[in-house]
Amino acid sequence: GIQVEQSPPDLILQEGANSTLRCNFSDSVNNLQWFHQNPWGQLINLFYIPSGTKQNGRLSATTVATERYSLLYISSSQTTDSGVYFCAASVTDSWGKLQFGAGTQVVVTP
Amino acid sequence: DVKVTQSSRYLVKRTGEKVFLECVQDMDHENMFWYRQDPGLGLRLIYFSYDVKMKEKGDIPEGYSVSREKKERFSLILESASTNQTSMYLCASSLGSGGNTGELFFGEGSRLTVL
């Protein structure tokens, strides 16, 4: 099946800093999503982005499907951005089976 | 907004008990999923359903069963709970079809402890 790798595994930021999280995947995808897991454990949708670029407030994401990677940008980070960020991907012949990466643990300090 | 509701945030059960985890979504989504999340192992798919009364095994179905009698409700059943089923259980739903899982929306999670 598809392999999904995220980097870095951990990230410590000072409030106000910018950062980039990366997701590499091993095959052509028809589905790529980014999630934020809050301290209470809920996974919150950030982006559904199998290709192209999207922005939502201070967050944006870019997926370059031909080169098999996606990037999540956090600008002007805030303490509420802390948590684990996951990307997940699937390919057409594995319908229903979204493969999650191991996540990036982000800590934003005041 | 999509709302996926899991019946219990925290449960404590004894070994051998039958456990039901309920999940309800309000967006008429065709697909529903159950994952478990464990430290060091990430999120793993247990079962999913693409229609009423239909189910498909995920990566770790052993020790679990599911039920989908109504479109909005997907239940995960542990017939005889064991300590290695202590975990965070996450339910999700999506509208995907035609070979695409679609955009997943998750519930708040149910943290199960089996003693």
Image (cartoon, rainbow, N blue to C red):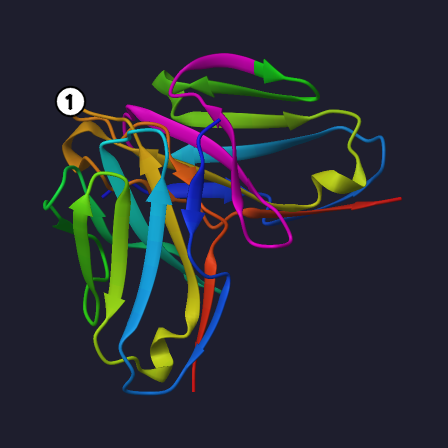
- In the image: residue A96, left or right of residue B115: left
Q: In this view of the protein, which residue sits in the foreground, A3 or B73?
A: B73
Q: Residue furthest left?
A: B54
Residue A23 versus residue A57 in the image, above or below:
below
B14 shown above or below A80: below
User: Percent x, y for residue A31?
Assistant: 33, 27
Identify the residue at image location x=54%, y=33%. A22
Q: Is residue A6 above or below residue B34?
A: above
Which quadrant of the rendered structure holds the C terminus of chain A?
top right
- Give the crowd class for mark 1: few <14, some 14-19, many >=20 residues within 10 Å: few
Q: Amino acid at mark 1?
A: Gly
Label 1 sits on a secondary structure element that is loop
Residue, disc 1: B98
Is residue B22 magenta-colored? no
Q: Chain of mark 1?
A: B
> Which quarter shows the N terminus of chain A?
top left
Instruction: Please give the range of residues in magenta.
Output: A27-54
Q: Residue furthest right?
A: A110
- The percent position of residue B97, horizontal first and vertical second, equals 19, 25
